[in-house]
Image (tube, rainbow, N blue to C red):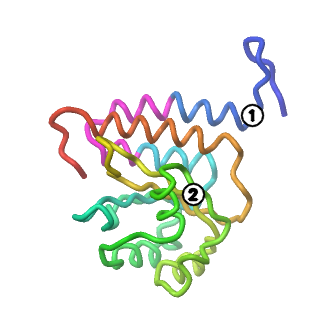
Amino acid sequence: MVRRNRNLWVTIPERALMHLVEWTGAAARGAGDLHTAMGVVLRDVAAERGYVAGHAWVPAGPSDSWQSSGLWVGPDETRLHALRNACAGTSAGPVGGHLALALERQATQWVGDLDALRGSAVHSAASAAGIVGAVACPVFAGGEAVALLEWYVATPARPVADLPHALGHLSGVLSEVAERPGLVAC
């Protein structure tokens, strides 16, 4: 469906993404710390796109070592219990799958399946929860990756084309939050 808006043709999905960029970006900027700002972005993107869950990873020492931040959003705690435990139980180390792609390419990445994680507790728990794919978005500050956001999806359908741009903008907002003077990292 297309609606006319200020002499521009804007599709309904694009309007929803513009709302994410504007309103979620403003709410994240207003957060007092990076952890809270990431929670705003995870929650709003998951709700707007209908994703099963959102989760954040943070560095755990060396640049190639990551751990769960413990920050999760999702409507069904029972459904996500095993996945949360699997991520929390993952030893700090290099990330794989969609997260590794996002870091390597320094951009939002989507995978329609989690086959790169096959054999891991995370893959097993995601499969049991009906999760088939994921979207990952890195956050950089001062030239270093400071967080990896991920959203789990229950369908292998490719996201709308403008989603990477919207998430890239929100990643930039989180970078601004992370670079505030005197801010303590997550």
Kindly identify the residue that appears in the image at 46 percent across and 32 percent down.
25
In this picture, is 102 found above or below 20?
Answer: below
Residue 79, horizontal then vertical, whole percent? 53, 73
Q: Are marks 1 and 2 in contact (CB under 8 Å)?
A: no
Badge 2 is on which residue?
Answer: 135
Q: Which secondary structure type mostly characterizes the magenta part of the structure?
A: helix
Residue type at tag 2: Val
Q: Nearer the viewer, residue 22 or 164?
A: 164
Query: Residue 149 is drawn in which quadrant?
Result: bottom left
Residue pictured at 40% horizontal, 73% vertical:
87
- Mark 1 crowdedness (10 Å alpha carbons): few <14, some 14-19, many ≥20: few
Residue 184, image x and y in percent? 18, 45
Left/right of residue 160 with respect to residue 33 in the rendered view: right
Q: Residue at the spot x=48%, y=84% of the render?
A: 120
Marks 1 and 2, how far apart at CA: 21 Å
Q: As drawn, which residue projects farthest toward the top?
A: 7
Q: Residue tagged by mark 1?
A: 12
Q: Position of residue 135 (x, y in %)?
A: 57, 57
Q: Position of residue 186 (x, y in %)?
A: 25, 52
Q: Is residue 116 above or below residue 157?
A: below
Residue 104 magenta: no
Q: Which segment is the magenta one?
A: 23-39
Count all numbered tags in the image, as a single digit: 2
Outermost residue, left direction? Answer: 182
Q: Which mark is residue 61?
A: none
Q: Vertically, is 67 above or below 21?
A: below
Looking at the rendering, in which quadrant would you find the N terminus?
top right
Callout 2: 10 Å neighbours few (<14), some, many (20+)?
many
Taking 47 as reference, is 176 above or below it?
Answer: above
First of labels 1, 2 by sequence position:
1
- Helix, strand or loop at label 2? It is strand
Outermost bottom residue: 119
